[in-house]
Amino acid sequence: MIERILKKNEQNVAVAPKEPLYKNDAEQLDIMVRYTQTHKRFSDDQKLEREIACLNVLFPDVFRPMYEDDLILGRYDALPIGFGSVTSVGAPGHYCRFDQMIKIRNRMDKSAHATIDQLIEYWKIHDTREIFYKDNLMENIMGPFVDVRYPIIVTARFSGMYLDYNKLLDHGINGLMQLIESKKTENPKSLSEYQSMLDALHLLKKVIDVHIDEVVNKLNEPLSDLRKKQLNRLLEALKEIRNDKPTTLISAMQLAWLYSSLAGVVNYGRMDDYLGDYLVNDLKSGRLNEAEAMDLIESQWRLIEVKRTNVNGRVIVGGKGRRNEKNADVFCKLAIDVTKRAQMVEPQFTLRFYDGMDPEIIEKAMESISTGITYPILYNDDVNIEAVMKTMNVDETTACNYVPFGCGEFVLANKGVGTPNVCINLLKSLTILIHDGVDQWDYQYKLGPLSLKKMKEIMTFEEFLDQYKQQLSYYIETSAQAHAQSYKVLNDQVGFIFTSILTDDCINRGKMVLDGGVFHLGGTNEMYGNINAADSLFAIKKLVFDEKKLTMQQLQEILAQDFDNHQDIQRTMINLPKFGNDVDEVDQLAVWLHEFTCEHVAKQAEKVGLDSWLVVVINNQVNTEWGRVTASSPDGRIAGMYMSNANNPQSGADINGPTAMLNSLCKIRADINAGTVQNIKFSRRMFTQEKIKIQALFKTYFKKGGPQLMVNIVNQADLIDAYHHPERHRDLIVRVGGFSARFVNLDKDVQKEIMERTCND
């Protein structure tokens, strides 16, 4: 029997260590006390006034001094108590990171303990997620993110927001203020909303003023001629954007970055679309040469990378629907070159492509991927735009503005919400069903009030599938209510004012983003263990119902014992056909499961008041973390072992080559979900020496309907050596699931899952 050990997981995917905060513990505590006192002064009915007041406590104090090589400014620290949008930078809404507060308490003198304890007790009641959890968890059914004992985990987060940077740059701060003022007469009932927007923009000006002073002071120090030139250029940009529209690349980048920082967003949109014109104008006028432009872009990349958001930090380039495609492509090409040169884990550099796009961009993308950086991630517009039109019920112009965020969920840039506030483990659910509702990991009953047949009563595979459908339907319907409730709690507590200003149609409607302001209020449901569940269904069909080698009771017993004394049966299960080998009999069960879950999830949207609620199969490393507490399964997987990542075959199960693997993936419909991710691994030798064949393989895959592809180029021997000797491979980058990481920063079982993926050589 496998020992049942529960490892506590972080509330967000934390891989790369963050820099220590700039301020010392006493300085942090002072800000957090003032933040808490400010929060106490207001009621929930004054949420907008409270939000602005609290933001004024944080900013500009939490910004760090510039680094010596910064060409753009805006490094800031998320304190253990503060305001945010996502778990990777603070947390959503008004938050307290209790684990970090305990660490501060342990470091500080006893004289500070009472103050820290009071803060912790206050935020146990007022932390936005804690408010949600108080009324929306279900014993043994639905737990908090990421408590993987449950078949469902939920949270209240505001991930994946993309701002309208074109609106910001086209108007400038003063222009936005004028636009907001002009709407007051149209929406007289929204005066408090409009005032909060104006107050937010005044705060942005205050932040710019502080950075102006910082640059002025720096220029009074002894500097090289090059650094003086860089800082004078930066000073000119900061002075320009304080009031006026940006006219240069650096001023546009600086305004967009500072605004993003105050909004707390961690995905940065179609950067070539909103920066391309500025870049080309600077190059044509001689204000910048190409090398200087690349240095600016790399400085932006460093600011993104240092946030260590792990599963965020998206920058999107390419694709249909850009305002000036020719100029955007100039930025796109330079950005690919910078990404290849910089070799950073973030940004998650993403290329949307389509038939007819400049072929030089694809060529540059393949060259970048060949270095092992894993970027750019490839998205097929010819498939995805039509899929978004269908799933989100929007027109083509709107769908052209789809963007993947985080691990690969689709959202409508600056027009939509698509945060994944629900996750369901399909394999854990299946193992619970097999054992008549009892999870063989912790032996708790996890079917709630659902009344299903006992396994011994089931006579046909169709009957078994019907029971599984009933179970998943219950989990899906229950979690849909929780997802909708997460938006209500968020909206009750905060306005996300900065995000609202640059989200359609908040200004015109005079409403905050979750209070009726956003054009498309969607959401996503992350599914895990899909492929293991499909492989397990095939094993049940084959061994129990077709060949009758086992009864359901015998299957229960074998799995409950973790295959002890039944290794022959386990080998039989492992050797059965698996998804990823272009074997239609097993692939069709993956297709069936995908279609059932996607369709049933989508049906819930209208019932719970959303414009869309869609499945995403875009796992990060939670496929491993959830696998740690998922019981033994009929595919031959032992209890505690990782599950397959996202849409991909179980690691090592695809044995018929890359063509067969991609053929299996193409059978999974892309037009009924909001994103799936596909990982494929090649040796450096094969990717470089068989370049023409691989490009033909990719082209065929995308022509057959492949929506997306993430490519790992790595030598298997390097992975094995890095596993045993991490000190030799500090720079080895791999694609985990919906994010990239330095291999040596990953947990050992996550490393093992990546090592055991098929490496095509």
Image (tube, helix red, strand yellow):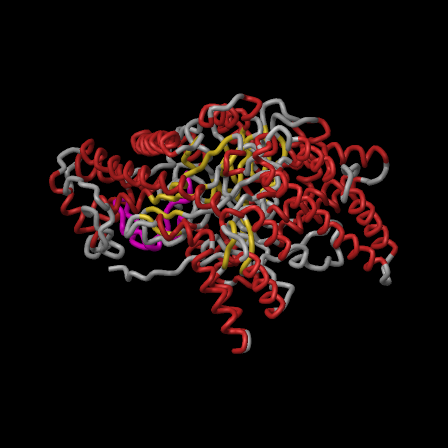
> What stretch of residues is rendered in magenta?
623-647
Does residue 225 appear left or right of residue 564 in this picture?
right
Quadrant housing residue 370: top right
Q: Is residue 77 left or right of residue 441?
A: right
Q: Nearer the viewer, residue 51 or 409?
A: 51
Position of residue 700 relative to residue 476, above or below, is above
**Where's residue 343, x and y in %?**
64, 49
| Furthest residue in direction left, as rendered | 457
Residue 135 inside the magenta-drawn segment? no
Residue 366 screen position, x and y as percent: 61, 37
Please determine whether, in this image, residue 179 is positioned above or below residue 449. above
Is residue 624 in the magenta section? yes
Residue appearing at x 18%, y 33% in the figure: 463
Residue 376 in sight in this render: no
* Residue placed most toward the observer, 80 or 232: 80
Identify the residue at the far bottom of this view: 110
Task: Tell me the residue at 53%/69% (across/down).
Answer: 104
Label the magenta part by its dominant secondary structure. loop
Residue 293 to residue 126: above or below: above
- The N terminus - image quarter: bottom left
Q: Which image quadrant is residue 348 in?
A: top right
In the rendered image of this protein, does residue 651 appear above or below residue 399?
Answer: below
* Position in image of residue 606 (x %, y %): 38, 29
Which of the pair 170/22 is nearer the observer? 170
Q: Is residue 599 visible?
A: yes
User: In the rendered picture of this protein, how many numbered marks are placed on residues?
Assistant: 0
In the rendered image, residue 596, in percent from the top left (x then y), is placed at 32, 31
